[in-house]
Amino acid sequence: MKRPWDADANTFLMRRLGKSPQELGLTGGRDDCPDIWELGNGDIAVIGRDVTAAFRDRLPDGVRIAADERLVIIPRTMLVAAKADIPDA
């Protein structure tokens, strides 16, 4: 069955939403950089820590993680910094 939405792996990272992890003091180098990006097709990409296994058995009712999905965590300060770049509609 076709999904109502699927990720487009052929799009591109268009612009960062918010401040860089370096500006926010959230990275010690090049290998641990949480980030939020708007893609060329308007979708959003989030780079964060994969905590799927830790959360899988304690998800709220109605929340599911498909086999090809991951639950990632980013610092709150990163999303707050991106707020101005996220449209209201």
Image (cartoon, helix red, strand yellow):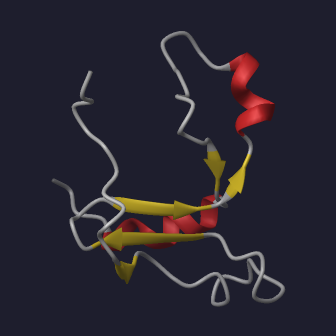
Query: Residue 23: x percent and y percent?
Result: 63, 90
Residue 13 occupies which quadrant of the picture? bottom left
In the rendered view, would you say 76 is above or below 20?
A: above
Is 10 or 57 nearer to us in this picture? 10
In the rendered view, would you say 64 is above or below 3?
A: above
Residue at far left of view: 89
Identify the residue at image location x=70%, y=37%.
Answer: 52
Left/right of residue 7 with respect to residue 65 in the rendered view: left
Residue at far top of view: 61
Identify the residue at image location x=55%, y=9%.
Answer: 61
Query: Residue 40: x percent and y percent?
Result: 24, 73
Is 38 or 67 nearer to us in this picture? 67
Residue at far right of view: 28
Query: Residue 10: x percent and y percent?
Result: 31, 67
Query: Residue 28: x percent and y percent?
Result: 84, 85
Residue at far front of view: 1
Left/right of residue 57 with respect to residue 24 in the rendered view: right
Identify the residue at image location x=54%, y=39%.
Answer: 69
In the rendered view, would you say 64 is above or below 83?
A: above
Left/right of residue 83 with respect to residue 63 in the rendered view: left
Name the quadrant of the N terminus. top left
In the rendered picture of this protein, how many numbered marks are placed on residues? 0
Identify the residue at image location x=75%, y=17%.
Answer: 57
